Amino acid sequence: MLLIIAAVLFALGALGGLVMAVRSFKGQSIPVPLAALHGLLGATGLVLLIVAALLGTASKTALIALIVLVIAALGGFYLLSFHIRKQRHPRAVIVVHALVAVIGFLTLLTAILQAS
């Protein structure tokens, strides 16, 4: 159940991330509440995956998803540093962050499907 809740949180966070990416590519500002919600949803999903790992209920596939999503989160923190400094977000970093997050999310979905 933890993995499913985490996946839902990541999916909701991804919607916010998509909006932020589109706004950034259009040269528009990124609303702070949206960025905060995106980060909060992702962080909560990561915590749930960590809890599943600590409880021993996470499969190897789920652990791989966790590692990939932690890497995506590090990219998100890097992007946040540009937001804080009020600088343009590098497009390449946005794309890599999104691709890594999607790979992690799909890996998590694979873990969920394998468990059922």
Image (cartoon, helix red, strand yellow):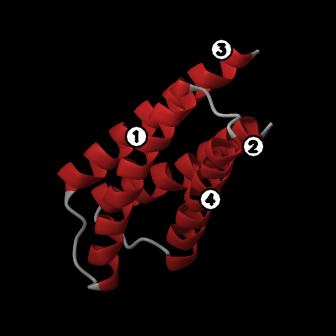
Distance Cα–Cα, label 1 vs label 2 = 18 Å
Residue 114 - label: 3
Q: Name the image quarter holding residue 101.
A: top left
Q: For mark 4, does the 10 Å Cα neighbourhood hold few (<14), some (14 to 19), or many (20 or more) residues?
A: many
Which residue: 55% across, 68% down?
A: 34
Q: Is residue 16 above or below residue 53?
A: below
Distance Cα–Cα, label 2 vs label 4 = 11 Å
Q: Position of residue 60 (x, y in %)?
A: 53, 26
- Specify the amino acid type for callout 3: Gln
Instruction: Name the residue carrying label 2.
Output: 5
Instruction: Name the residue carrying label 4.
Output: 41
Which residue: 67% across, 51% down?
A: 51
Q: For mark 1, does the 10 Å Cα neighbourhood hold few (<14), some (14 to 19), or many (20 or more) residues?
A: some
Q: For mark 3, does the 10 Å Cα neighbourhood hold few (<14), some (14 to 19), or many (20 or more) residues?
A: few
Instruction: Name the residue carrying label 1.
Output: 68
94 to the left or right of 109: left
Q: Position of residue 17 (x, y in %)?
A: 48, 53
Question: Which of the two labelled residues, at mark 3 and mark 2, occupies the earlier sequence position?
Answer: 2
